[in-house]
Image: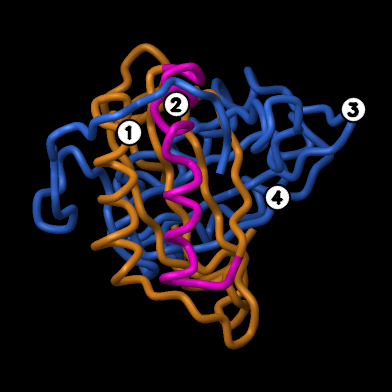
Chain colours: A orange, B blue
Amino acid sequence: MIKVSVMYPNKPGVQFDHDYYRDKHLPLIKSRMGAALKYYTIDKGLAGTAADAPATYVAMCHLLCDSVEAYHSSFGPYAQEISGDIRNFTKQTPIVQISEVVVENSATDQTKAPNRDPAPPEGREGQRQHA
Amino acid sequence: MIKVSVMYPNKPGVQFDHDYYRDKHLPLIKSRMGAALKYYTIDKGLAGTAADAPATYVAMCHLLCDSVEAYHSSFGPYAQEISGDIRNFTKQTPIVQISEVVVENSATDQTKAPNRDPAPPEGREGQRQHA
């Protein structure tokens, strides 16, 4: 399985219509890609590593397909139409990358996620910090 | 639900031990965060928008939690240990962002993914192109 990640860079004062993105743009992609699109996810950027740091991306979506070929053959014919819809929710240009899905969901993917449900560790102290 | 996206920038000749990342690092995070980590996903970068363009990120993981607070309280106490493990699989420093999960999975999230399973569109021509 592969994942196409579409990431819209954030910037101060960025305009992004998250409602349109959820209610119109992704359904458009789904209707055009048909069964080749197994499912998609949508994220809305909240913060960076520090609590008051901005998110790197104002929004992201991830499109899951069985293969790179399945993505190309289903998305390609509609790429111009789908790209043309971007202006309806933002002026940002997304970064796109294709990834191999190594672990799709650690809670359900038994074969690829070792050490599932280990005992919770001791010694939590409740302090807040980021890596 | 929130998603913590950890993204390792790609560069020519980048070193990244994907096996260690899958078999050691993410299980370490899971063991430390305990039940606060609902599940995680792992991606391995394959390509950018053009077939021969490099992926922006050599690897990514996404950590799913019920809330930002659940993430902070479970990850925070182990942030130093977890960050210290990064040197075991790469010299890259990840970009981290926290996002609100708008649609977790369009195939199963009925309430947030309108227009589920519309009829596939007509007129595919099979050409290959990217947005």
Mark 1 surroundings: few (<14), some (14-19) or many (≥20) residues within 10 A: many
Q: Residue at x 56, y 53 (%)?
A: B78
As for residue A69 lying within the magenta part, the answer is yes
Separation of residues labelled 4 and 2 (CA atoms): 27 Å
Residue designated by label 1: A33
**Residue B22 shown left or right of residue B74 in the figure:** right
Residue at x-position 22% and y-position 44%? B106
**Looking at the rendering, which quadrant does residue B118 occupy?**
top left
Q: Quadrant of residue B69?
A: bottom left
Residue type at mark 4 is: Pro
Count how many numbered circles sit on residues in the image.
Answer: 4
- Which residue lies at the image location 52% right of the left edge and 34% below the top edge? B26
- Describe the element under mark 3 as helix, strand or loop: loop
- Residue A47 at x, y percent in the picture: 53, 72
Viewer-side label of 4, 2: 2
Q: Which residue is mark 4?
A: B94
Circle 3 residue: B13
- Which span is picked out in magenta? A67-92
Real-space Cα distance between discs 2 and 1?
Answer: 8 Å
List x then y, in percent, for residue B120.
19, 32
Residue type indicated by callout 2? Tyr
Q: Which residue is mark 2?
A: A71
Disc 4 to disc 3: CB gap under 8 Å:
no
Q: Is residue A48 above or below residue A67?
A: below
Q: Helix, strand or loop at disc 4?
A: loop
The answer to whether tags 4 and 2 share a subunit is no
Relative to B104, residue A12 above or below: below
